[in-house]
Image (cartoon, rainbow, N blue to C red):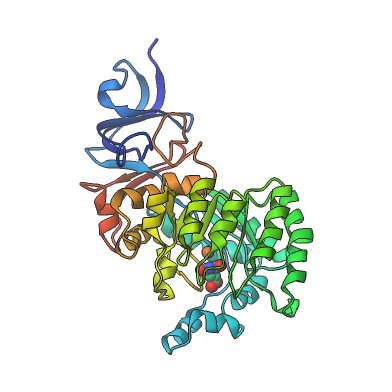
Amino acid sequence: MAERFDRIWHNARLATVRRDLPDLGVIEQGVIAARDGRIVFAGARSDFPSDADTAERIDCAGRWITPGLIDCHTHLVFGGNRAHEFELRLQGASYEEIARAGGGIVSTVAATRASSETDLVAGALPRLDVLIGEGVTTVEIKSGYGLNTETEMRQLSAARELGRNRPVSIRTSFLGAHALPLEADGDKDRYIDLVCREMLPAVAQAGLADAVDAFMEGIAFSGEQTARVFRAAKALGLPVKLHADQLSNLGGAALAAEFSALSADHLEHTDEAGAAAMAQAGTVAVLLPGAFYFIRETNKPPVELFRAHGVNMALATDCNPGSSPLTSLLLAMNMGATLFRMNVAECLAGVTREGARALGILGATGTLEAGKTCDLAIWDIERPAELVYRMGFNPLHQRVRRGQ
Ligand code: DI6
Ligand code: FE
């Protein structure tokens, strides 16, 4: 009997981004077939069963299909904005100086605490819609602007609600250890106690977090404090990730690797030992060129060391009000290439396969292959390099999520 499909996309060029194929795993004359929201065939037309019984056939007229894009590091849900702080920075203040003077993250915390869940969802939707408009089908969203149990949970709950409001998969990370709230009175250890003993168990109990993140930095938390958060996360069965070596090298990459973190993110100041440890642990390097650009960082992440050691690299927007008010993954790819010298295949894998790996969901999404969720981006381009090359131009023809 002929095989049955709900829908096929034919006359397409596929960038499958499969690891086992060279470069981007390109298949000219490609076909994708879906059933029940999953890919059941992604390959050459010549291998596709000619007697297939298909309910709907979509002629792609030679367009390119990539996996739906994945933004694996965002702080999309927050109150207010920090345009005023941007003005101060234009007058000469640095990102770190503003943070130390009580601006920065804690000012967004005040605005977030004053926002209802409805406000938070309404504020994030326009940002999410811009990402979706570029073919994004999965977005990671962190908490970290509540810094108390109630507001952290409200932020995460708003993130989950976004996934019910729009056809997009949301993955959440609890980032209670993002900054020290004012009421902690400078006592970081006591605040970390609160994170580990109260906030994290409550978040885990409510099923609001898929992973646990922390900000290890001079203006945030030490390696010892980060390790306490990670031990508490592991005890609850949650995977970890880390904002590591962004402004200075405190050994964040190595610490993340020690805890088998899914990813270590930023990494502008990571050294060779850190890169080697990440390779050994299979920890993905999530590079965030929007933050590098916006705070005018001069140290680049050691992309060549990552290549030499075989560390997988992802790219994300880091969308947040302070260091990266960026809602374009396409522009993040362009910046990954121009600022960090990543090549086209690395940039495209960075927002698909490696983004999925950084979220621990590579088994379900991130490449075009049978068995995965049918999340696709269909592009009006002549070659994949166009996705990386242009600035401020969106060639998306259509986005498909779960086969729809
Ligand atoms: N690193 C960042 O770049 C963001 N958080 C972090 O840990 C910045 C967050 C902000 O400035 O609001
Ligand atoms: Fe971040």
Q: Dividing the picture into quarters, in which one does residue 378 lie?
A: top left
Q: Residue at x 57, y 80 (%)?
A: 99
Q: Dividing the picture into quarters, in which one does residue 3 lie?
A: top left
In the rendered image, the vertical position of residue 296 relative to residue 30, given as above or below? below
In the rendered image, the vertical position of residue 26 relative to residue 190, given as above or below? above
Q: Residue at x 37, y 54 (%)?
A: 134
Is residue 296 shown to the viewer in this render? yes
Q: Residue furthest top?
A: 1
As rendered, which of 263 and 384 lies closer to the eye? 263
Q: Position of residue 363 (x, y in %)?
A: 51, 36
Count of residue discs: 0
Q: Quadrant of the C terminus?
A: top left
Q: Residue furthest front?
A: 273
Q: Residue at x 69, y 45 (%)?
A: 237
Quadrant of picture, ligand 1: bottom right
Q: Residue at x 49, y 40 (%)?
A: 362
As rendered, which of 125 and 220 lies closer to the eye? 220
Q: Position of residue 308 (x, y in %)?
A: 38, 51
Q: Position of residue 366 (x, y in %)?
A: 44, 42
Q: Is residue 6 left or right of residue 226?
A: left
Q: Position of residue 247 (x, y in %)?
A: 50, 72
Is residue 282 shown to the viewer in this render? no
In the rendered image, the vertical position of residue 20 relative to residue 285, given as above or below? above
